[in-house]
Image (spheres, helix red, strand yellow):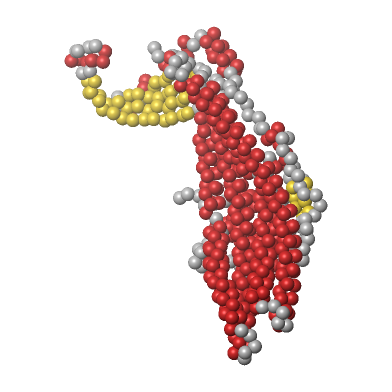
């Protein structure tokens, strides 16, 4: 009789005791996961610049100070003091397709966890059917016409199957899927952080382009007025015609730059429309300039032990390592025996109205023990492959941590250099302004040629536009610091997290 059909009364006490001892004595095989975050954090340092950055006059010229261990708000972008920027970020969080994709991936991982977790429970199935068939005695070696028969067969059955999972293979599989859910959660956090940073950076770029365009249009207007004045003076015989030609050439060069600036402004506005999930043909960005933004004066710097627990990319890499660790345990568990218990209860009858009579009842109890003996080395190869996958994920995790610390170090240095650069740009602008005023005075006195005036004007105009770029870079790198430190997602209220993670479900 097959083992799956052994009646319960045939099981002897020693057999039951052995099975119970085997079940209770089993444990999860494979390595238990231990986070390497704290150990790796000890190998790195985050050194914030000492004191304040350089201070200059004008928009974006304030000094910035660094504070180690200072808290990071989830809505750090509000430090820029722009309600219009805040509204753009809210719109992006509600409408961004990329964020919706990350939310859907998280829901997918959560449902897959539900599916995997169900394997820990018994399987219960209800089946039933009706067939009409003809049979003979050939299957039992009887070639007797008396065995030929045509009959109906009605069957209803309730079947129970339970995998005892002696070495906790299903637990390791569930552990791996739990890590995948956490991985998807951190990818969502990373998507949110990247989205906010991109909106801030694109809005700052848009404001800087508006300032550059306004400055360039002012330069063109002044150069046009100057060219017209020189033309009048040339007709009066007070200046040479060559000076008029030089002024017109400079005006033409400046005018030629305006279409490129207007195109850059339009494409940047289109990029912002995509980030906030709006139609680029109808979207109109708020008319911000760099002067409408505040430069945060107090900047946080996280400790290494905090950074490895804050950045979504590090946490995501850790969960991938956790999943790989669980898969090593899963591959190890499959090297050992597995015990499956089965039970069924049902009815079999030749007439439908007799299906539920006592005589039609059938049942079975069974236990199947499967021990792998020879699989051509497949199982051990799978375990070695899982171990190699863990090593790859560990190397990826270390690289992610190292990349994070490099990024923070780069941004901290950039913020310091940005302040020094803006200070230098201010000095350059002031020097070129004074130089231009002097050359113009000398030209009116006949001590300098108009070519000297054009050269001085070009240097001054370039210094003016360069200062705008330097201010933009300060705002961009300030946002990059908050991005590099993890964006403060852990400081968000539960209500805000729930609202952000909400998304329409599939039909």
Relative to 361, residue 282 above or below: below
Residue name at image x 26 percent, y 15 percent:
139
Residue name at image x 47 percent, y 24 percent:
161
Q: Quadrant of residue 26?
A: top right
Q: Is residue 431 left or right of residue 145?
A: right
Relative to 424, residue 30 above or below: above
Position of residue 300 measured from the top left corner of the image (x, y, whole percent): 75, 50
Q: Is residue 466 left or right of residue 258?
A: right
Relative to 371, residue 58 above or below: below
Front residue of 84 and 385: 385
Residue name at image x 71 percent, y 76 percent:
439
Q: Is residue 480 left or right of residue 110?
A: right
Figure quadrant of the N terminus: top left
Kindly give the residue lying farthest to the bottom in the view shown. Answer: 236
Position of residue 268 measured from the top left corner of the image (x, y, whole percent): 56, 62
Kindly give the residue lying farthest to the left in the view shown. Answer: 145
Position of residue 328 measured from the top left corner of the image (x, y, whole percent): 55, 26
Position of residue 489 measured from the top left corner of the image (x, y, whole percent): 67, 48
């Amino acid at each position: 009789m097959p083992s799956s059909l052994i009646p319960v009364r045939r099981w002897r006490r020693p057999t039951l005791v052995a099975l119970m001892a085997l079940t209770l004595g089993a444990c999860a095989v494979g390595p238990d996961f231990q986070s390497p975050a704290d150990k790796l954090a000890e190998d790195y340092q985050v050194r914030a610049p000492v004191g304040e950055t350089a201070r200059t006059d004008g928009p974006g010229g304030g000094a910035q100070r660094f504070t180690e261990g200072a808290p990071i708000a989830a809505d750090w972008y509000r430090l820029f003091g722009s309600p219009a920027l805040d509204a753009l970020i809210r719109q992006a969080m509600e409408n961004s397709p990329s964020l919706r994709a990350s939310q859907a991936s998280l829901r997918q991982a959560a449902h897959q966890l539900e599916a995997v977790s169900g394997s820990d429970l018994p399987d219960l199935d209800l089946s039933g059917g009706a067939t009409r068939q003809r049979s003979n005695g050939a299957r039992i070696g009887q070639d007797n016409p008396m065995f030929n028969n045509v009959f109906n067969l009605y069957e209803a059955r309730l079947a129970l199957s339970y995998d005892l999972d002696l070495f906790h293979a299903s637990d390791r599989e569930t552990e791996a899927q739990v890590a995948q859910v956490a991985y998807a959660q951190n990818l969502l956090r990373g998507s949110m952080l990247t989205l906010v940073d991109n909106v801030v950076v694109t809005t700052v770029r848009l404001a800087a382009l508006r300032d550059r365009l306004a400055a360039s249009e002012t330069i063109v207007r002044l150069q046009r007025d100057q060219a017209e004045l020189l033309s009048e003076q040339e007709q009066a015989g007070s200046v040479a015609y060559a000076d008029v030609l030089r002024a017109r050439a400079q005006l033409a060069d400046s005018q030629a730059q305006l279409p490129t600036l207007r195109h850059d402004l339009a494409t940047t506005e289109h990029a912002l429309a995509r980030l906030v999930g709006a139609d680029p043909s109808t979207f109109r960005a708020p008319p911000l300039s760099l002067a409408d933004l505040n430069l945060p004066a107090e900047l946080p710097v996280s400790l290494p032990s905090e950074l490895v627990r804050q950045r979504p990319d590090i946490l995501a890499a850790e969960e991938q390592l956790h999943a790989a660790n669980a898969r090593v345990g899963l591959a190890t568990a499959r090297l050992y025996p597995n015990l499956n218990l089965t039970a069924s209860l049902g009815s079999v009858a030749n007439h439908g109205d007799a299906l539920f009579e006592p005589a039609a009842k059938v049942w079975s109890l069974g236990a199947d023990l499967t021990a792998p003996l020879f699989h051509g080395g497949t199982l051990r190869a799978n375990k070695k492959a899982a171990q190699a996958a863990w090593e790859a994920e560990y190397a990826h995790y270390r690289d992610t941590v190292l990349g994070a610390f490099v990024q923070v170090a780069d941004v901290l240095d950039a913020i310091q250099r940005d302040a020094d650069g803006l200070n230098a740009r201010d000095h350059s602008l002031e020097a070129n302004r004074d130089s231009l005023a002097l050359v113009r005075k000398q030209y009116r006195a006949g001590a300098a040629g108009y070519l000297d005036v054009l050269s001085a004007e070009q240097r001054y105009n370039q210094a003016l536009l360069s200062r705008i770029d330097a201010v933009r870079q300060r705002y961009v790198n300030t946002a990059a610091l908050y991005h590099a430190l993890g964006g403060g997602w852990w400081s968000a209220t539960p209500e805000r997290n729930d609202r952000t993670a909400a998304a329409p479900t599939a039909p």
